[in-house]
Each structure stands twice: as C-alpha cells, then as structure tokens.
Amino acid sequence: MNILASLALPSLEADLQRFEPLLAESVVVGDDFLDQVTTHLIKAGGKRLRPVLAIASATKGTNEATQDNLLGAVSLELMHLASLYHDDVMDEAVIRRNVDTVNARFGNLVAIVAGDYLMARSAAIAADLGTEIAGLLARTLAQLTQGQVSEVQRSFDVNRSREDYYTAISGKTAALMASSCRVGGLTSGASDAEVDALTRYGHELGIIFQLRDDIMDVTAVDGELGKPAGQDLAEGIYTLPTLVALEDPTIGPELADLLGRALDEPEREKARSLVASSSGIDESLDTARSHVARARAAAHELPDDQLAQGFASLAELLLVGLPE
C-alpha cells in the first residue's frame, strides 16, 4: 500500500524524513535498556498513517512542515505505539510489523511500563503545543480506552451486536485518525470549518481502515498481515464479517458452535473458512464502500483541491487488494 504515491503531495516525503528522527529522539532518555524498548517498534517501521494524516492536513503537501506540525504528528504516533504495546500484551501477540513484539522479547511487565512511558511522552508533547491540543489528546486517549474496553467486554460473545462493534472501532481506531487530521488543522491555524471537515474525514478513514483490517483477517494469506491471519477469531474478537456470518441461517449455527472459546490452529482455519463462505465479506466490503463515499465527501469540503483529491484517493486506496 503506497500511501505517499496515492496522496501525491509534493512536500510530504521530505517532511516525513524530518519526522522520523524527531520521533525516535522523543523517547530516548540515555538509558540503553529503556531506549532499546521504547524504540523497538519505531525501528521496525510501519505505514506511519497517523503522522501522514497530521502532516498532510497541516501543510497541504505544498508547504514545509513547521516544528509544531511535526511535533503534533509525533504526539499522535506515540499514542498509537503505546496502544500497540498494550494491545500485544492483552492479545499475547508475538509478532508485530514482522518483528518480535515488545512483550515477546522483553516480557509483559516491561511492555506495559514502556507503553505507559510512550503515552506520557505523547501527553507531554501535546501539552507543549497548547491546551487545545492537550485536551484533544486526552479525550482521544479516553476514546481509545473506551473502545478497547468495549471490545474486551464482548470477547468470545457470539451475540455481540453490530452497534457494539461500531462503538468499539470508532473508539479504538477512528478516534486517533480523526484526531490526527484535527491536530494537523489546529497546528496550521486552519478555519473551524476546515478543521471540522478534516476531523470527519479522519473518522471515516479510520472506520474504513478497521473494516479493511477485519476483512483481511479472514481473507489474507500467510505473511500478508505481519501477524497470523485469523487472529481475531482465535482470540474471540468477532468483527463485522463474523457477525454477518453468524446471522446466516445455514452457516451461523455451525460457526456459533465453533466460536465462544479460544481456538487452536485447525479450528481457527475452519472458522475462517466458514466466515469466508458467507456473505460477511461482501457485506463488509459494501459497508467500507459507503464510508469511502463519506470520506470523499468530507475531503471535498476542504478548500485545497490538491489535498482534497489526495485524501479522496487515499480512502479509495484502502479498498485496493481486497476481494472483489
């Protein structure tokens, strides 16, 4: 997925090159062990989607990013990384971005404390940017936590509602992307109308991104995700494709008998096959397309045509590679 090529914003690549060392430096304290832990996933790379959204929203891809623009992006990425450290402990995950997770390499306690440290650094940087951004990041953290709690509360629940699913993904994924775009607008002094349009775009993009991830969890081949395919099913996180499959009068009862507990590998693959053979993937794709349309509408409210077109193209890019 080539995000920069899809956006086609001239100054963005150079700004990201300035962002990367700033991100690493923001968590280095001079303690060899702590520095190794806090930079572990930073060094592993990643799509950097949230910083891209923040910087693009601030600069429109034509102006050089200011220090505040870059620091806003750093604060958001640190919050995202902290959530990954904590998520991997809860999920007992061993692979993230094709490297060992922090908990797998250093242990759960170190991963939790390091995630807390990253969150603290995110908050400190946000505070330096002013009370509005500090408040926004605090509210975003609350939404992330609420979304995660909602998901954990309904784990292994074959009666999970679609409403609960949307509540969870709006918090755990869409909130941070909405804030990424909003911080970009705020650090660039954009108008209230533009900031609101950016925020709505980021929210829709986050929903699309999560739907994509949930579809791929069912349909991906080995090695495509940087984590085991079917992990959500195995861990009792029943996403939209699975919820639709459970409603199927033919497939649903067999799938429900299989779910509701942890799955070993053969059971996980059987569950994936059942979900894939239902209408769950098609309905989830249709839902994602409806959110792409909403994202495009929000993007085209932006006053900068080049940014509007880039953001519209990015929303469409998230559907590329999914089943037809």
Image (cartoon, rainbow, N blue to C red):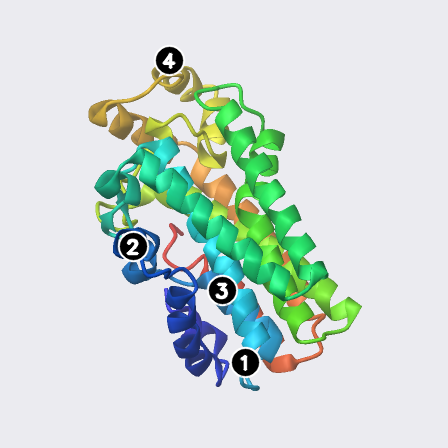
Between the C-alphas of marks 3 and 1, the distance is 13 Å
First reached walking from the N terminus: tag 2 or tag 1: 2
Nearest to viewer (mark 2 / mark 1): 2
Q: Earlier in the sequence, mark 3 or mark 1?
A: 1
Q: Amino acid at mark 4?
A: Asp
What number is the disc on residue 65? 1
- Asked whether residue 267 is in view, the answer is yes
Q: CA distance from mark 2 to mark 1?
A: 26 Å
* Numbered mark located on residue 74 in the image: 3
Q: Residue 314, position in %: x, y?
A: 50, 66
The image quarter in which residue 4 lies:
bottom left
- Alpha carbons under labels 2 and 3: distance apart: 16 Å
Give the side of residue 233 with respect to residue 319, left or right. Answer: left
Q: Secondary structure at mark 2?
A: helix
> Looking at the image, is mark 1 or mark 4 earlier in the sequence?
1
Q: Nearer the viewer, residue 122 or 323?
A: 122
47 versus 244 height, above or below:
below
Q: Is residue 287 above or below residue 35?
A: above
Residue on which disc 2 sits: 40
| Image-quadrant location for residue 166 | top right
**CA gap, disc 4 and disc 2:** 40 Å
C-alpha gap between disc 1 and disc 4:
54 Å
Residue 297 visible in this rendered orientation of the protein: no
Task: Indicate which disc, 2 or 3, sits on the residue closer to the N terminus.
Answer: 2
User: Can you identify the residue that label 4 sits on?
Assistant: 257
Give the Cα distance between marks 4 and 3: 45 Å
Name the spot of residue 320 as percent of width and height, x first.
Answer: 41, 60
